[in-house]
Amino acid sequence: MTERVSYLTMYMTGGPVRVPATIGAMREALPDGLRERFIAEIESAPADQLQFTLVRWVMNIPTPHDAAEEELLGRVRSGDFSPVTFAEDHEVRAVPGPG
């Protein structure tokens, strides 16, 4: 049986980037040298910090980035989530039509 992999789409300055959407698939996508640290941190992360921990780690999955993304990645990797917005944090509003 083939395992189906789910993906999330992250919208970076250079365009959309697909990343694995499960902890197991994220682990496999990380460079070999980071996998043990990833599992140790995920297993000990408090529930209210799990989303931020996953976002920080997904930034270590090799994907193409431009210079602006590299700056953003550096901030997120250091724990600064101020430039990060989660989709569920946005209120969807109708745009009024003309006149």
Image (tube, rainbow, N blue to C red):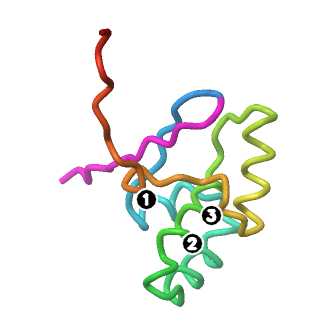
- Nearer the N terminus, badge 1 or badge 3? 1
Count neighbours of disc 2 (C-alpha within 10 A) and say few if under 14, some if 14 to 19, many if 20 or more: some
User: Quick check: 45 above or below 83?
Assistant: below
Q: Which mark, by number, is residue 61?
A: none
Nearest to viewer (mark 1 / mark 3):
3
Count neighbours of disc 1 (C-alpha within 10 A) and say few if under 14, some if 14 to 19, many if 20 or more: some
- In percent of the image, x 77 and y 58: which residue is there? 75
Say what secondary structure mark 2 lies in.
helix
Q: Is 14 included in the stretch rendered in magenta?
A: no
Say what secondary structure mark 1 lies in.
helix
Would residue 60 appear left or right of 15 to someone viewing this image? right
- Nearer the N terminus, badge 1 or badge 2? 1
Q: Which residues fall within the magenta stretch?
A: 1-13
- In percent of the image, x 51 and y 60: which residue is there? 28
Q: Quadrant of the N terminus?
A: bottom left
User: Quick check: 96 above or below 77?
Assistant: above
Residues tagged 3 and 2 counted as in contact (Cβ below 8 A): yes
Residues tagged 1 and 2 counted as in contact (Cβ below 8 A): no
Q: Disc count in the image? A: 3
User: Quick check: 18 above or below 37?
Assistant: above
Amino acid under disc 1: Ala
Which residue, given by chain and number where applicable, does mark 3 sit on? 56
Nearest to viewer (mark 1 / mark 2):
2
Amino acid under disc 3: Arg
C-alpha span from label 3 to label 2? 5 Å
Of residues 94 and 64, the one nearer the viewer is 94
Would residue 29 appear left or right of 24 to someone viewing this image? right
Q: Which mark, by number, is residue 53?
A: 2
User: Quick check: 39 above or below 7?
Assistant: below
Which residue, given by chain and number where applicable, does mark 1 sit on? 25
Find residue 39 and report its image quarter: bottom right
Q: Quadrant of the C terminus?
A: top left
